[in-house]
Image (cartoon, rainbow, N blue to C red):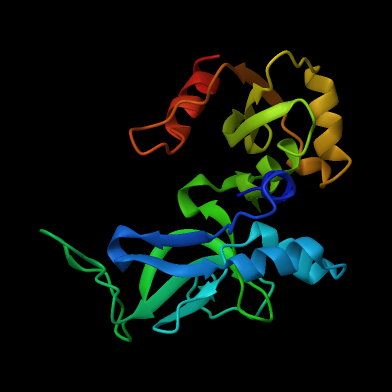
Amino acid sequence: MPPGIIARAMALLPNVDFTNAYGLTETSSTITLLTPDDHRQAATSTTPAITRRLGSVGRALPSVELQIRSEDGTVLPPEEGGLVFVRGDQVAGEYHGLGSMLDAEGWFPTRDRGFLDSDGYLFLDGRADDVIVRGGENISPGEIESVLTEHEAVADAAVVAVPDEAWGEGVGAAIVLKPGATVAVETLQDWVRNRLRSSRMPQRIVFYEALPVNDLGKVLRRVIRDRFAQE
């Protein structure tokens, strides 16, 4: 949930108890929670490390352990991004015809990317397969999407890898505007460039009436990537 969106929702609905949950089918659903108290503390805090928790999925349930690992399997310290691993009695991690995906110590690779802060709050960056590799630099779509949705004209955004002859992959963004809103491509590019590094700026932007989603409401990034490739 982009922090800007949840902050606006809490301002409009101050008596609602917002909860953000993260989990997978293979983990018997929920493994982390950002509780209503977490939401209110983050929304009212003046400490940046606490305020940013509005963009997290909370802390692990008491029965669950989390680790962030690098591509080579090294367990990473707080604030370093990598692959999310989970362990606990509720974690199945087994597939019909494939067997168990747990490692020797019972850890399951979620194939999601993220990082933990020093208090154990998990921040997700997206799926490992969605990472954009631009000239050897790994770029998370999530951080760019969060910045784009903070623009007053943008209702929704999805960022994907696009073919780039010089860098291998570049950044493409599919944008849904708010009703009646207009904005130039260059304005959105400057918006991102001024808030993130220039390598994060979408070199290509397309506008959608609505992002393509599956029956569960998940964005079909493959469809968006295919459109960029065809163009």
Q: Is residue 189 visible?
A: yes
Residue 189 in the image: x percent, y percent? Answer: 80, 29
Tell me the residue at 65%/55% (across/down). 15
Residue 148 in the image: x percent, y percent? Answer: 73, 36
The residue positioned farthest toward the front in the image shown: 15
Q: Quadrant of the C terminus?
A: top right
The image shows residue 32, relative to residue 164, as above or below, that is below
Tell me the residue at 75%/42% (across/down). 147
Q: Quadrant of residue 48?
A: bottom right
Tell me the residue at 84%/34% (across/down). 191
Q: Quadrant of residue 134?
A: top right
In front: 217, or 134? Answer: 217
Q: How many marks?
A: 0
Left or right of 152: which side holds 217?
A: left
Residue 88 in the image: x percent, y percent? Answer: 34, 81
Residue 98 in the image: x percent, y percent? Answer: 15, 61
The residue positioned farthest toward the left in the image shown: 97
In front: 29, or 201? Answer: 29
Left or right of 64: which side holds 130?
A: right
The image shows residue 205, relative to residue 78, as above or below, that is above
The image shows residue 59, relative to residue 186, as above or below, that is below
In front: 1, or 7? Answer: 7
Tell me the residue at 71%/37% (across/down). 149
Q: Is residue 71 visible?
A: no
Left or right of 12: which side holds 76?
A: left
The image shows residue 185, relative to residue 12, as above or below, that is above
